[in-house]
Image: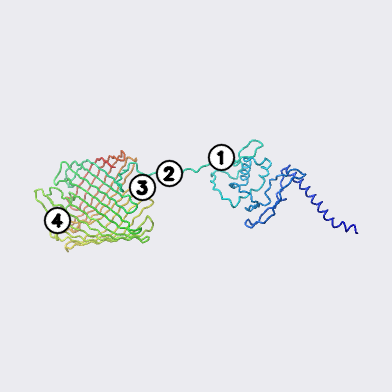
Amino acid sequence: MQRLRLLSPAAPRAACLLLAAGLAVAAGIVMAQTTQTGLRYPDLLAPRLETNANKPPRFSKSSPARNTEWGAPTTFALPPSGAGTTGFDATNAPDRPTTVRPRSGTTANAQANAQNSQNGEMSALRVTQAAQMPPTPPSPYQLPQIVEPAPANATANTATNALAAAPPGEPPVPAVGPIRKPLPKRRARSEEDPYAPLGIRVGAFNVYPSLELIGGYDTNPGQSPDGKAAWLYTAQPELRMQSDWSRHSLKADLRGSYTGYSPDQEPTLSRPYFNGTVDGRIDVSHRTRIDLQGRGLISTDNPGNPNLQAGLAKLPIYFVYGGYAGIGHRFNRLDLSVKGDAQRTEYQNSTLTDGSIVSNKDQNYDQYTGTFRAGYQVTPDVIPFAEASVDTRKHDLNADASGYQRDSNSITGKGGMTFKMRGSLAGEVALGYTKRSYEDPRLVPVQGLIGNASLVWNASALTTVKLSGASTVGESTIAGTSGVLYRDVGLQVDHAFRRWLIGTVKLGYGNDDYVGLSRDDNRFSAGVGLTYKFNRWLQLKGEIDQYWLRSNQSGNNYNETLFLLGLKLQR
């Protein structure tokens, strides 16, 4: 019993020593087998960390392996004992290059094997062992890499598409292929007309001058039932100007012409023509603007106009000039504007065939107009509006040659819409009602429906359709006639057979209602034209126009055919 008590305290120590020796021998055998056969036991010595990456458990730092009688330490293809699979790396190892994590495990193993093969750091056995290991997640402290997406026809989950053939005994190599660069952006096709004028730069303005020389033949230039034909010539200069400012705007459109006939007739039909407007806009603020316009017109009445005196030696010339000033402000989507307009109409004296002079001062008058307009922007491209205007006309003489007092007042209201639909249809259309009352009680008011339109429809890349409409109330010198209500509508279709060959078709209709006189005229027109563009500076134009007038009063109907051929120079 005494001997047993002496040995009993040492017995457990001896047992522990024997047990540790046995475990060491077993571990060495297992390690040797692992090295020879390539088997791995990832969970034998290294714990797997499946805990919170932000609060990882702490492990004591293990001592480095030492050489023993079993030989040099063996390197295992196992993850370090301090690295888990949750994304937290507690090994304090230096950052490794960030690799792209592919969509499938097969591709990940192939990329890992290719990288190890290129670096020459792993043997074929270690490559095989690493291929059997789960992919190591990237460190959360490394920035992600932007990867170009694979082509749509690529199969990411097929190993044969990710690996290329390699010589026997070598690890598989990923079939990366050439580096793919992003394709350059395709430039939008320019729709610029190669035959459009380039203009001339003058300071901050783009100026577009042109000159058109026209010759032709007119079967009835006098627009009478028994008119005589004559040759004609026309010189038509034009000047357009547009500012190029970051704020404000100024543009001008000046058109003129002179038409002569041979042989000339009585009255002399040769006459000048000019029509010019200058528009300006001052941007007071982002929402407030000031609109300005100046305009001028030089022309003659048509030879068949009943307002002309009998026995004229030449057509009298009249002048119209004026302008307006207005202010507009935009309240979010609501746009309000008001403007005042002043205009002067003045006639030259008429020269008769007997040499006498007849004054036309009774036709001279001033007109003052006030207009209020409200528009609401339903969408950026659709703006309905309502407009109301009042005006007054004051003649130089209180009564005309027939004794009628022709001063008058007018009120006009109309509603319409400006729109731009998908870049194909744009413009403005309006419909309304007007009434003009005269100072002389013998003159009945001129009233009726009116309409205005200015539309452009790009039916296709080659075809453009234009619609125009206008309604005005004109003065009259016929005794008992209050005035003339003019209504006109026109349709023009341009088609490009080639960019340098443009065909044109025109249709028109007009109605002249002589209020107070039982006369109503209907005017019709049709025409075809062809334009050949040599380049940006030179064009050849040909046109044939046909005009008809049909009146409810006999002796006023006529037909007219016009043949024109012109050369246009532009810059």
First in sequence, mark 1 or 3: give its number: 1
Residue 449, picture quadrant: bottom left
Q: Which mark is residue 459?
A: 3
| Colour scheme in use | rainbow
**Foreground disc of the pair 3, 4:** 4
- Residue 103 screen position, x and y as percent: 59, 47
Q: Which mark is residue 361?
A: 4
Mark found first going from the N terminus, 1 or 2: 1
In this view, 326 is above or below 255: below
Query: Do the residues under discs 3 and 4 have CB atoms within 8 angstroms?
Result: no
Is 377 positioned to the left or the right of 435 in the image? right
Q: Are marks 1 and 3 in contact (CB under 8 Å)?
A: no
* Crowd around label 1: few <14 · some 14–19 · many ≥20 (10 Å): few
**Of pointers 2 and 4, the one earlier in the residue sequence:** 2
* CB contact under 8 Å: marks 4 and 1: no
Relative horizontal placement of residue 138, taking residue 371 as reference (left or right): right
Question: How far apart are labels 4 and 1 at the CA level?
Answer: 92 Å
Residue type at mark 2 is Arg
Image quarter hosting the C terminus = top left
Residue 385 coordinates in the image, percent (x, y): 33, 59
Q: Quadrant of the N terminus?
A: bottom right
Farthest right residue in view: 1
Q: In the rendered structure, which amino acid carries the disc numbered 3?
A: Ala
The answer to the question of whether label 2 and label 3 lie on touching residues, with beta carbons closer than 8 A, is no
Rounded to the nearest angstrom, the CA distance separating label 2 from label 3 is 24 Å
- Amino acid type at image mark 1: Gly
- Residue under numbered circle 1: 177
Q: Which residue is mark 2?
A: 187
